[in-house]
Image: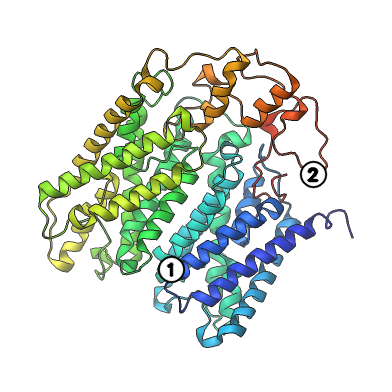
Amino acid sequence: MTPFLRPLLPKLLTEAIGTFYLTFCVGMSAKANPAAPLCIGGVLVAMVFAGGHVSGAHYNPTVTAAVFVRGRFGSKTALGLSPLAAALYVVAQLVGAYIGGACALGLVGQDSLGYPSFPSEKLGPAIGAECLWSFLLATVVLNVATAKAQDNNNYYGLAIGFTVLSGAVVVGGLSGGAFNAAVGLALPALAGEGSQLWVYLVFPTLSGAAAGAFFRFTSPADFGVVHTGVFAVLPALAMEWLATFFLSLYVAFSPSFGGSRMSELAMLAVTVALLSTAGATSGCHMNPAVSVGVYLRSLRSPIAAGFSMQKLSAYVVAQCMGAACAAAIAAAMLDSHPTLGIHAPIGYPLPAPASTAPKAFFAELIGTAALVYVVLNVATVRHLARNSFFGMAIGITIAAIGSAIGPVSGGCLNPAVGLLAVFGTAWGQAANGGTFTSAWIYFVAPPLGGVIAALLFRLQNYEAEYSPEAYVADTEVAKRYQAMTEGNEEQQRFMVHMPPGTVKAVDVSLSAAKFVGKLKTGTTVQDLSGQYAPSAAAKVHPSPGDALPEAYAMDAVEPIHSLDGDGGQ
């Protein structure tokens, strides 16, 4: 056995096992189980957590293509996946998919076997849906599982599985919801339906490769590139556009899945996935009301200054552009634009017929204040630095509050998403003769809710964030415990998005492992520039057989769950 192949065998076995179970669950549930998206997304969550440390847990040629392209740009934080290794990964995935599909076929029979498919007259929407959600899936994977800024997080598997869950609900009716060439080839072939295989082979894989290039643009630090001036904020604006685009797509596509029992869960899933993905790059506001709250929260803060009025304006423009693009694409795919023939208008928030404008306004005001209040407290405070629950907390808030006030105001909570009401009524009037004159509610009430939330936050957190004693630079090891528990201020402030180097006083905040290592060796940290050489005892997750160097540079550590084909080692 060659030295190249031996270390690959456990990885290939892991890829085959994970793809087996993913395909098995699709085949068993997709046709007969209303909760199939939960079954499919759930098993992917489990398999990613189970196999990520061995193979990177791709389980999908789309992901392998994304990781391969990502590595072609000279990454500083992820080992490259060679062409031969990538090809063997795909072979293992196909083998696992065919075996998993065959087992499902044997259990339920050909008539009940679930497999991706779409009406032949809807080829264009099917291609569009596969491209969109395959790109999102690969982008989520690269950001939560390979990005330096999200090293050692605990939510990567949940974000990846939730992306597939949301896609199965949102666009599953348009394309069959494969997002995976292995699943899209194996199950239809076993079911005797081979005419659409090329769609699932070509477009998800190309979208994965495009996601690898997009990651290069939005995560320049992972490739040793430092942008200055106006270019420094472009990656953040691109991620704001992307996150708001997909959030708006969920709403715009709602006419095609609105009756699904899984719609509320899909809203939670897509928001958690987006927050986990873009949080470390832009803060993932994806909502002008959140950006307003973050701006007001940052004013006169000795810790969180940096979200300027100029950045606020740029964020709002990017968010509105994302929603506008989502409306146009959904209109084309749902065949709802007047020039294409009106069949089903795009989805958009709409108050209940029995509701009044004041009631809708008040509901949106209360609901958005709750959302922004949660955002500011779970994603911008020092004492919750580097937590892994921010995405779940914010996503649950959006799903819960949106569902609660939906029967009154439509549950918009977001001026950018509110733009869908403008596009939807403009394009849908000829279809139903209806008008909607209350769109102004979504542009006024949510920002006011953000203002209220920011004021409440400042009152609640004055002593810890705004008082003259809020932060004193640490110069003694005894003070390091506070810095250690609060994490690295440069990386943790997801919603504020301060570029590296903005907060000089806390550059030397230590992780728990480094701090304990320092205590064990009896040394102290005196250099406040952030440049230090921790001892061997401070290494966080050494690879098996690694020699522990006397001086260890933490910025060379791979994410433990990196999907680079080497298990992050």
Please state, as top left, top right, bottom left or bottom right, where the C terminus lies in the image.
Answer: top right
Q: What's the amino acid at mark 1?
A: Gly
Q: For mark 1, give the secondary structure.
A: helix
x and y percent of residue 363 in the render? 19, 47
Query: Dividing the picture into quarters, in which one does residue 375 lie?
Result: top left
Figure label count: 2
Q: Which of the two marks, 2 or 1, is nearer to us in this view?
A: 2
Q: Which residue shows up at 52% across the image and 70% down it?
A: 199
Q: Residues within 10 Å of mark 1 (few under 14, many from 20)?
A: many
Q: Residue at x 62, y 47 (%)?
A: 70
Residue 141, compared with residue 186, is above or below; it is: above
Q: Quadrant of residue 50?
A: bottom right
Q: Position of residue 502 (x, y in %)?
A: 49, 21
| Along the viewing direction, whichever of 102 and 422 lies nearer the viewer | 102
| Disc ID at residue 544 | 2
Q: Residues within 10 Å of mark 2 (few under 14, many from 20)?
A: few
Q: Which residue is mark 1?
A: 172
- How far apart marks 2 and 1 lie (CA) works out to 42 Å
Up-down relation of residue 292 to residue 5 (above or below): above
Q: Secondary structure at mark 2?
A: loop
> Quick one: 416 or 540, which is closer to the camera?
540
Query: The residue under label 2 is which amino acid type?
Result: Pro
Can residue 534 be seen here? The reply is no
Is residue 214 shown left or right of residue 369?
A: right
Q: Quadrant of the N terminus?
A: bottom right
